[in-house]
Image (cartoon, rainbow, N blue to C red):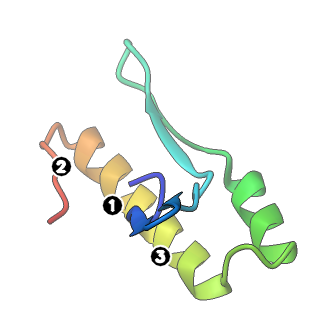
Amino acid sequence: QRNTPAEFYPDGVRYIDLEIDVIQRPDGSLEVADTSELENKVRQGFLTPALAERARAVARELAEALARGEPWCRT
């Protein structure tokens, strides 16, 4: 998940982009990208350190599952 769940309000919708991405290239190589952007959001006060750590953990879980060739689904 690259962002927080959408929150619906009478005047709009809000979500927070967590910045971190997991990239799987056609050759199968994997990269957890944009971690510095995630850290910048923490320094700027847009994300808590706990939420950033959770985003990193989920990215690692996804990358590890993809490396094993397993489907990945978070419920």
Q: Are marks 1 and 2 in contact (CB under 8 Å)?
A: yes
Q: Position of residue 29 (x, y in %)?
A: 43, 26
**Front position in the image: 12 or 17:** 12
Q: Residue beneath label 3, please?
A: 54
Asked if residue 72 lies left or right of residue 37, the reply is: left
Q: Earlier in the sequence, mark 3 or mark 1?
A: 3
Q: Position of residue 37 (x, y in %)?
A: 76, 53
Q: CA distance from mark 1 to mark 2?
A: 9 Å
Quarter in which the C terminus is drawn: bottom left
48 vs 58: above or below: below
Q: Amino acid at mark 2?
A: Trp
Tag 3 secondary structure: helix
Circle 3 packing at 10 Å, graded few (<14), some (14-19), many (20+), is: few
Q: Residue beneath label 1, please?
A: 61
Q: Residue beneath label 2, please?
A: 72
Q: Residue at x 45, y 65 (%)?
A: 4
41 vs 33: above or below: below
Q: Amino acid at mark 1?
A: Glu
What residue occupies the far front of the structure in this picture?
A: 10
Q: Amino acid at mark 3?
A: Arg
Q: Residue at x 43, y 20 (%)?
A: 25
Quarter in which the N terminus is drawn: bottom left
Could you say which quadrant of the image residue 74 lies in?
Answer: bottom left
Tag 1 secondary structure: helix
Q: Position of residue 33 (x, y in %)?
A: 61, 43
Q: CA distance from mark 3 to mark 2?
A: 16 Å
Q: Earlier in the sequence, mark 1 or mark 2?
A: 1
Could you say which quadrant of the image residue 35 lies in?
Answer: bottom right
Q: Residue at x 33, y 60 (%)?
A: 61
Q: Earlier in the sequence, mark 3 or mark 2?
A: 3
What residue occupies the far right of the structure in this picture?
A: 44
